[in-house]
Image (cartoon, rainbow, N blue to C red):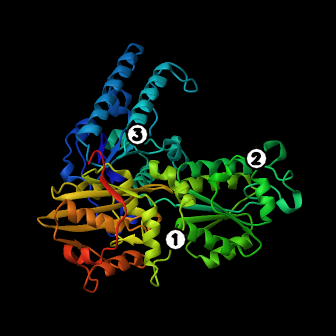
């Protein structure tokens, strides 16, 4: 923990909040010298640190912006204070980007008020104050673009900890701790949420009538449904706009509606609709139970119910779907309640929010829509699958190295369940630390064929041990099933590194049957915690592979 003040209760609250989110981990904190924030960051040892928390306050930028130092608040001092703050921000940015280069870093920007050093009345912003805030904003925006750095949302903190109830001047002067207890608790809780943030949801299924639009399509007609301000239906327009935003970030969005399919088709042809029909897939419309639609959509997406949110204006429909899928989050669309609707959008943002949007996110829906049906290779129909794969013109691109900044690989490990070697998840800190071992490798696999690109869909983490490799982690996206990409991945390892054996740190889970079946198909012994596959056995059991396998340009 790097801060310029005495951490006291703040440190205690942060440890407690992290323990609540990660009860199996033992939390230890180390702090630096009082009053030397930049020096504390510059002096960290990455090998002894899993996470770096940086709490910046105004006095860290210049001591005259605090109350413990009597350096002067004269008008003539103000330009120099601003220049000094600029210099310190530059030093802090360099320290965070260099000394802490391999450590996941979580930063809170100044949360306390500036002292009354400006000549304007408190209700009027001073030019010097605005320049300080502008410099701070530029500093935060620059760091926020880095994959291993998270900046705490100041506006969210304002909601849970009112600015007028944060500063304790008595505690600051007597103990060097500037926060009121309630503010220290709120700040620690939000930082802990940044550090241990749950994986985002993957898909949203929405109703149509009185949800995506206002009105009942079968009663009001195509021209009678609305989503505009002059028709008092603006929240439905905002909802459409929000879903379009989710879809553009790679979140799967679909429709489950009791309606007449022909009318729905006409409604989606309206030019003033704020979400493109192409962003919604599948659109499942019929008069049967909504749970039937949801079941078909989940099968099309090939994801679990607990990764999906279902939204409908009818409590009865929500209850019916919830009974069929207890793990699914089912939320009511609050059509008459504007404030509750606003809270719904915020809740959805938290459920689906992600740090970065990858190339794979942008093509996810397109690849699902374009996916050709794969022949069933069971019951002796392997020839049919062979013919299909041979005709697919598939290409597998393999990257091999130590790209620990690969956010897509990190994301796949933490959200993939079915083809997952052992179900283990990794934190950002353990991900960074894993690569300190010189024998460690990261192998990622990208795939495309004539039906479209799937992007980066598989990750193997392991270590080389002479003529053998030990795989600690192996995951593959469900979108890549039945294309023998898993076989090609192992074949590439055996061939390119002349390996004689590969071992797998396998553990069964409730949901990883696909990888259980795969391992059972290539090994001659029953599955155990230490699955071993020899090159000879793999060659005998590996089916024909038709991909063009190649190494990535930077591999």
The image shows residue 277 at horizontal and vertical percentages of 68, 52
Which quadrant would residue 58 be assigned to in this image? top left
Which quadrant would residue 296 be assigned to in this image? bottom right
Disc 3/disc 2 C-alpha distance (Å):
33 Å
Please state which of residues 219 and 168 is positioned toward the viewer in this rendering: 219
The image shows residue 483 at horizontal and vertical percentages of 42, 67
Disc 3/disc 1 C-alpha distance (Å):
31 Å
User: Mark 3 highlights which residue?
Assistant: 145
Using the rendered image of the protein, determine whether residue 336 is visible from the camera's viewpoint.
no
Using the rendered image of the protein, determine whether residue 134 is visible from the camera's viewpoint.
yes
Mark toward the start of the polypeptide (1 vs 2): 2
- State the SS at label 1: loop
Mark toward the start of the polypeptide (3 vs 1): 3
From the viewer's perspective, is 75 left or right of 53? Answer: right
- State the SS at label 3: loop
Which label was assigned to residue 234?
A: 2
């Amino acid at each position: 923990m790097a801060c310029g003040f005495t951490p006291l209760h703040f440190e205690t609250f942060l440890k407690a909040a992290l323990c609540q989110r990660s009860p199996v981990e033992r939390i230890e904190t180390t702090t630096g010298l009082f009053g030397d924030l930049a020096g504390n960051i510059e002096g960290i040892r990455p090998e002894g640190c899993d996470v770096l928390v940086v709490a910046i306050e105004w006095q860290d930028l210049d001591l005259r912006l605090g109350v413990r130092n009597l350096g002067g608040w004269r008008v003539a001092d103000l330009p120099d204070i601003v220049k000094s703050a600029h210099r310190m921000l530059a030093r802090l940015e360099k320290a965070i980007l260099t000394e802490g280069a391999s450590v996941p870093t979580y930063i809170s920007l100044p949360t306390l008020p500036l002292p009354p050093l400006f000549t304007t009345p408190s209700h009027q912003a001073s030019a010097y104050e605005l320049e300080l805030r502008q410099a701070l904003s530029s500093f935060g925006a620059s760091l926020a673009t880095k994959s291993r750095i998270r900046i705490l949302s100041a506006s969210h903190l304002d909601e849970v900890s009112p600015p007028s109830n944060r500063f304790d001047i008595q505690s600051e002067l007597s103990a060097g701790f500037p926060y009121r207890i309630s503010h220290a608790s709120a700040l620690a809780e939000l930082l802990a949420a940044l550090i241990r943030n749950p994986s985002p949801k993957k898909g949203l299924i929405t109703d149509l009538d009185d949800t995506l639009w206002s009105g009942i399509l079968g009663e009001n007609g195509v021209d009678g449904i609305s989503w505009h301000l002059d028709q008092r239906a603006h929240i439905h327009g905002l909802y459409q706009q929000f879903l379009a935003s989710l879809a553009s970030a790679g979140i799967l969005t679909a429709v489950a509606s009791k309606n007449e399919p022909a009318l729905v088709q006409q409604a989606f042809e309206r030019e003033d609709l704020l979400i493109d029909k192409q962003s919604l897939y599948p659109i499942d419309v019929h008069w049967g139970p909504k749970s039937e639609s949801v079941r078909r959509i989940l099968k099309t997406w090939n994801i679990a119910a607990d990764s999906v949110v279902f939204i409908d204006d009818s409590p009865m429909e929500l209850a019916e779907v919830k009974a069929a899928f207890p793990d699914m989050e089912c939320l009511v669309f609050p059509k008459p309640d504007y404030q509750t609707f606003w809270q719904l959008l915020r809740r959805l943002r938290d459920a689906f929010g992600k740090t970065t949007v990858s190339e794979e996110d942008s093509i996810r829906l397109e690849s699902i829509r374009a996916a050709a049906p794969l022949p069933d290779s069971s019951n002796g129909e392997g020839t049919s699958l062979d013919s299909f794969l041979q005709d697919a013109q598939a290409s597998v691109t393999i990257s091999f190295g130590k790209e620990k900044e690969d956010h897509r690989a990190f994301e796949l490990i933490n959200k993939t369940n079915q083809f997952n070697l052992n179900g283990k998840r990794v934190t950002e800190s353990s991900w960074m630390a894993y690569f300190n071992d010189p024998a460690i490798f990261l192998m990622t696999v990208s795939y495309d064929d004539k039906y479209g690109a799937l992007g980066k869909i598989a990750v193997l983490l392991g270590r080389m041990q002479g003529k053998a490799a030990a795989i600690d982690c192996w995951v593959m996206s469900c979108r890549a099933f039945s294309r023998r990409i898993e076989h090609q991945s192992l074949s590439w390892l055996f061939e390119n590194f002349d390996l004689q054996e590969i071992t797998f740190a396998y553990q069964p889970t409730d949901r990883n049957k696909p990888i259980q079946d795969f391992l059972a198909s290539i090994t001659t012994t029953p599955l155990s915690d230490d699955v071993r596959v020899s090159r000879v056995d793999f060659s005998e059991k590996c089916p024909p592979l038709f991909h063009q396998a190649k190494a990535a340009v930077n591999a």
